[in-house]
Image: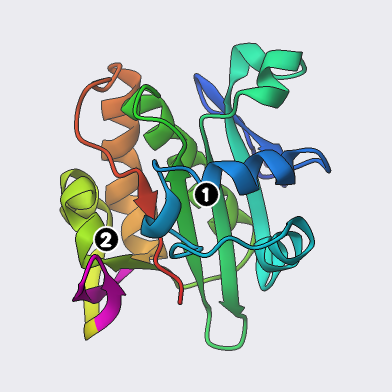
């Protein structure tokens, strides 16, 4: 019997979809990254680049990057202008089989379970497109309280850079977390999907940001 092959990685979840960034998305993204919600906590670390510099930095080293939007909004003006967040994979090492991932939710009003679903769809997409053994996430200490609810179930801490990042008049540790392909496919993804298909919890803790790239 011929196997049922589906070689195309999906960008759709049950409630969300990953949408590639268009030209006009980058200015909106720049303003979002300059907001109080993200600002110094994420990629720019308080910097205020001009549009041209931001465009270059936003795509440097990136192998995949999407906006997370509700499936009901795909193809509509609302879907183009009101993304829930962004997911990114960067810093790929194809010889050694790893890459980095990053995620940022744009507003606290975004249902956490929907954004978690978007991150899960993205992880599945990255593992389906490339033969990575594991995906790393760099999380500064001041972002960990927001990340604690999914830390143990998704990632394993593999390292820590002591007093690596300066913010708010002190130095913070940077945690190096890893998600393995083997545990994702056999353990993490099935349990996460069961949680999401039950509806999740819209008010459960969820990180605003999952990245701390220097």
Where 75 sits versus 59, above or below?
above
Residue 1 visible here: no
In front here: 31 or 42? 31
Q: Residue furthest right?
A: 23
Location of residue 112 in the rendering, given as x and y in whole percent from the top left corner: 33, 29
* Distance in Å between CA atoms under marks 2 and 1: 28 Å
Q: Which residue is mark 1?
A: 34
Q: Is residue 49 left or right of residue 56?
A: left
Q: Which residue is mark 2?
A: 155
Q: Is residue 162 left or right of residue 131?
A: left
Q: Is residue 92 magenta?
A: no
Residue at left offset 62%, top offset 38%: 67
Where 32 sits versus 46, above or below?
above
Where 34 sits versus 200, above or below?
below
Question: Callout 2: helix, strand or loop?
Answer: loop
Tag in front: 2 or 1: 1
Residue 162 visible here: yes
| Image quadrant in which you'd find residue 93 | bottom right
Residue at left offset 35%, top offset 43%: 208
In front here: 176 or 29? 29
In front here: 131 or 90? 90
Location of residue 81 in the rendering, given as x and y in whole percent from the top left corner: 68, 24
* Mark 2 crowdedness (10 Å alpha carbons): few <14, some 14-19, many ≥20: some
Location of residue 74 in the rendering, given as x and y in whole percent from the top left corner: 70, 19
| The magenta segment | 164-178
């Amino acid at each position: 019997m011929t196997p049922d092959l589906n070689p195309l990685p999906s960008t759709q979840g049950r409630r969300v979809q990953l949408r590639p960034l268009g030209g006009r998305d980058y200015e909106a993204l720049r303003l979002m990254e300059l907001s109080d919600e993200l600002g110094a906590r994420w990629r720019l670390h308080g910097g205020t680049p001009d549009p041209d510099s931001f465009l270059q930095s936003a795509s440097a080293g990136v192998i995949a990057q999407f906006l997370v939007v509700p499936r009901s909004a795909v193809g509509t003006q609302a879907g183009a202008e009101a993304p829930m967040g962004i997911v990114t994979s960067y810093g790929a090492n194809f010889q050694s089989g790893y890459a980095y991932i990053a995620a940022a939710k744009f507003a606290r009003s975004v249902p956490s379970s929907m954004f978690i679903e978007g991150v899960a769809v993205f992880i599945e997409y990255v593992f389906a497109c490339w033969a990575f053994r594991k995906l790393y996430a760099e999380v500064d200490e001041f972002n960990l309280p927001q990340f604690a609810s999914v830390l143990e179930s998704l990632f394993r801490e593999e390292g820590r850079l002591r007093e690596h990042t300066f913010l708010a008049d002190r130095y913070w540790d940077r945690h190096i977390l890893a998600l393995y392909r083997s545990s994702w496919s056999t353990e993490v993804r099935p349990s996460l999907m069961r949680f999401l298909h039950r509806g999740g919890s819209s008010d459960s803790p969820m990180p605003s940001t999952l990245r701390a790239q220097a």
